[in-house]
Image (cartoon, helix red, strand yellow):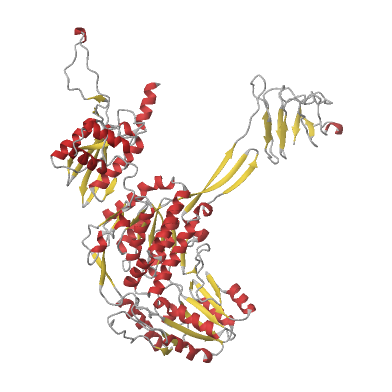
Amino acid sequence: MDNYMELTDTLQMLPPPPGSFIDREELIQHVGEFALSQGYVVTIKQSKKDKVVVLGCDRGGVYRNRRKPVDESSGEQSRKRKTHSRLTNCPFELVGKKEDGLWVLTVKNGSHNHEALKDISEHPSARRFTEKEVLLIKEMTEAGLKPRQILKRLRQSNPELSTTSKHVYNVKAKLRQGNVTVRRLKTLRPQPGEGDSHPLTATEPSWRKRYPPRVPNLIGGRFVDSQSSISIDVMNPATQQVVSQVPFTTSEEFKAAVFAAKRAFPMWRNTPITTRQRIMFKLQELIRRDVEKLALDITTEQGKTLKDAYNDVYRGLEVVEHACGMATLQMGDFSSNISNGIDSYCIREPLGVCAGICPHNFPAMIPLWMFPIAVTCGNTFILKPSEKAPGACMRLAELAMEAGLPNGVLNIVHGTHDMINAICDDENIKAVSTVGSDAAGKYIHERACGKRIQANIGAKNFTVVMPDANVDATLNALVAAGFGAAGQRCTAISTAIFVGSTDLWENKLVERAKALEVNEGTEPSADIGPVISKLAKERISSLIQAGVDAGARLALDGRQIVVSKFELGNFIGPTILFDVKEDMELYKVEIFGPVLLCMQVPSLEEGINIINRNKYGVGASIFTASGAAARKFQTDIESGQVGINVAVPAPLPFVSFAGSKATFAGDLNFYGKAGVHFYTQIKTVTQQWKDFLTTNDASPMLNSVDLPSLSQTMQTFDFPSSDIVSLGLQSGDYSNVDGPGHFSNVNGASLALNEVDFSSSDGESLPEEHSKDMVGDGGISPSVPTSHGVDWTLNF
């Protein structure tokens, strides 16, 4: 039995899972941290630093024995071995090899021949000095103190220090050789007080100091430069200057990121939800602290004005604040005593590794729609920012790490089509969230078939303007919602439908639009910035021309606008077209630019029909003073979000961002309850806690027998003996034919048989007086009289 227990303990020491790592140090750290959780320590057995590292267990089954064997007959006594002598010959062995720029870990032999360490501080490798302690040893040595005196003073500041004077001698010897570096095993956790300050709080990351910066990957908690030789220039849309370079993450680096997320998941899912919430509280505090940097990143890369950039950050911040209440949002349901002693309840559990694919138009808000909810639910996350505007996303990742998000919980990779395919195809990724164009969203939805998907894709938003609408409020709303952020948002009002004549509205609308200033986003007076790229500008201009050619009337043309000092910018001014028809190309597609289409209809019903016939359905709004018109619009319109005297009906995070028809593809919408449900799965638990009484002689006692209803079916239940239940039947065979029955008998309790018929086995019935409740003084009536002396069957 002892051997069995020892074998069981040994088998519990699992080897670390194999995987790919960015560098040698990360591989060693992974091995060491996992080994600690299993109760053993690993060290480097052999290393060709650039290509191979071999690691083995630092404890084995037999002592190293370099002494001569002792002859017991001679009476010579062997010296007692020191307490901390190293054990050797453990078969455990790992191999890390550098392949294609990454370190790949394989397990050559994962078994041990010894028990696990119960206290890691007992291991000799724990007797290491921190860098601060080494410097103190150096100072005290130079002051003339002896090793014992040095050790005594070190223990005053660290009473748990387990080193001996011998270790101080070793440090002094290295100091004499001029070696003041501190060799610390990666398998040992930092001591308390060590590494309290986060490196991100001290200085800007080194990659931001280059020009142009090369955006790194975030893998396993480390920002690492990609090994890829292919990259994309991130351009300032207003100046055409290169802001940064985004590498195409290699397939090996992507696998390393997925492995890091998968490795971090078990620990993170078991982290208390209140701890995860506290990290979100810290994250929202850091976002507020760095909101100016985030807004400037957005304006520099995406082009929108600083005012719009601030709104971008703050809308995402609302989702982070929403995630701070995850303990309530993730609560399950409980049903007590659904049957005798049985409870049933549902709990919400994280999915595992999830992924997000982001667009360029909201570089901060969309990532914050995704990873805060996902990770606070207990998932780990792979995030792919837009290759056109990755800066804000990278800064948010830095803040998340500073807030305390553990290594591997959030990872960032870069790329275009190949990276999207890798995310969709990887079996370890359980859910994919994306916001993007119509074609991209449909492709991701189809490619990632089998995973959970939420995809906000192509959009077209409408507003109906009634004749009784407030003129100033409606014009302000149309101008802000139609041209804000240069029309590059999925909630932009792209089509205004005027009920009745447009004469009252056209001139005033054009006048308000002309008053908007088009300029570089950091200019304080700027109302509209550039669109994202030259290609986007050309596409928007061609759609405008196609509308004119099809018969639309161009009331305001912004295609030829030139901004002083920013002549190379991708600027398009506010553009307004009237007399737009449903068959025109610019009506059918999402323009994604500062272009407002205007239509005229005779009635509200016709306006509603036009909106409902369109394939998109993000948002629709109505401007009116009539409650009846507003109610009809709210009821009849087919749209995910409805606004009444509100141009952009985007909801706050505690209400899900809804979409309908071709605008949304997938299972559940973003944030709100739906967002929490998307990133969690239900587990239903049914439990029974029930007391079973026994007789005094510990023999089985029939306390409660539930007989199921078996309509028109004879089922016989055999009770153990006539001492338990006796109705004058020697064997007590009872049959249930057409109704439920229940017996109970606890030392004197009565057996109630309500309105039951007793019939003989040959079909004869008892007299009517015996078909009532039968109760004996001491429990069950001793017998049931019969008229023919035959056994009776109990029919329920």
Image quarter of the C terminus: top right
Task: State whether residue 85 is above or below residue 533.
Answer: above
Q: Residue at x 78, y 33 (%)?
A: 753
- Residue 98 point in image, percent of width and height: 20, 48
Q: Is 23 on the left or on the right of 479, as rendered?
A: left
Towards the viewer: 613 or 697 = 697
Towards the viewer: 612 or 401 = 401
Would residue 101 be visible to someone looking at this image?
A: yes
Towards the viewer: 442 or 56 = 56
- Residue 788 point in image, percent of width and height: 82, 25
Residue 372 picture quarter: bottom left
Would residue 447 be visible to someone looking at this image?
A: no
Q: Is 335 on the left or on the right of 55, as rendered?
A: right
Task: State whether residue 702 is above or below residue 611.
Answer: above
- Residue 794 point in image, percent of width and height: 75, 32
Task: State whether residue 488 is above or below residue 103.
Answer: below
Q: Is 136 on the left or on the right of 502, as rendered?
A: left
Q: How many marks?
A: 0
- Residue 491 point in image, percent of width and height: 46, 73
| Residue placed furthest toward the front | 143
Residue 61 picture quarter: top left
Task: State whether residue 527 is above or below residue 347.
Answer: below
